[in-house]
Image: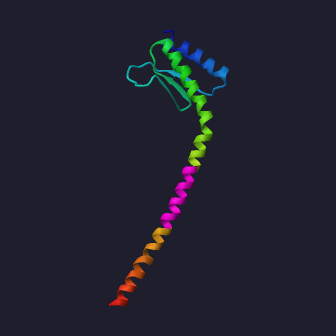
Amino acid sequence: MKSKADLEEKMRKCLDQLGVPLNVVLMPTDESSMQGEIRSNCILIYDRDESEAWLTFEHEIYEYKFKEVTAPYLALINSYVESFEKLAYDRKEKFLEFLPKISRIISEEKEAQA
């Protein structure tokens, strides 16, 4: 593998040319089950082999750009979830408000029968 600094610099140049606002850090290790990931606006690459590192780098750029495509769907799903949570909360509150009425009416009827 070329020097870590040289490879990182070439990868940063690619990111700049693509207009991808991420940094890249090579962290070769045998300890990770992943080859790379994006964390805190940084592509972390764990591969030891240079050609594998380039493949992982490319994959992580695709992953980053694909999130732009899926973001509207995620926003839509989150808005649905939020709406359903509000609806469920409102219904639960109405139910809890109704419980004392059930107990009161049943108790009144039981006492009237006695």
Helix, strand or loop: magenta stretch: helix
Q: Is residue 91 above or below residue 28?
A: below
Furthest residue to the front?
A: 113
Tell me what residue is drawn at x 50 percent, y 27 percent. 37
Tell me what residue is drawn at x 56 percent, y 20 percent. 58
Tell me what residue is drawn at x 37 percent, y 83 percent. 107
Q: Where is residue 62 shown, x and y percent of the image?
A: 58, 25
Left or right: 114, with 55 as reference point: left
Left or right: 29, with 51 as reference point: left
Q: Quadrant of the C terminus?
A: bottom left
Tell me what residue is drawn at x 42 percent, y 77 percent. 102
Q: Is residue 107 above or below residue 1?
A: below
Q: Which residues are magenta?
A: 80-93
Q: Is residue 10 above or below residue 39?
A: above
Q: Nearer the viewer, residue 43 or 65?
A: 65
Q: Nearer the viewer, residue 83 or 30?
A: 83
What colour scheme does the image use? rainbow
Q: Where is residue 106 shown, x and y percent of the image?
A: 39, 81
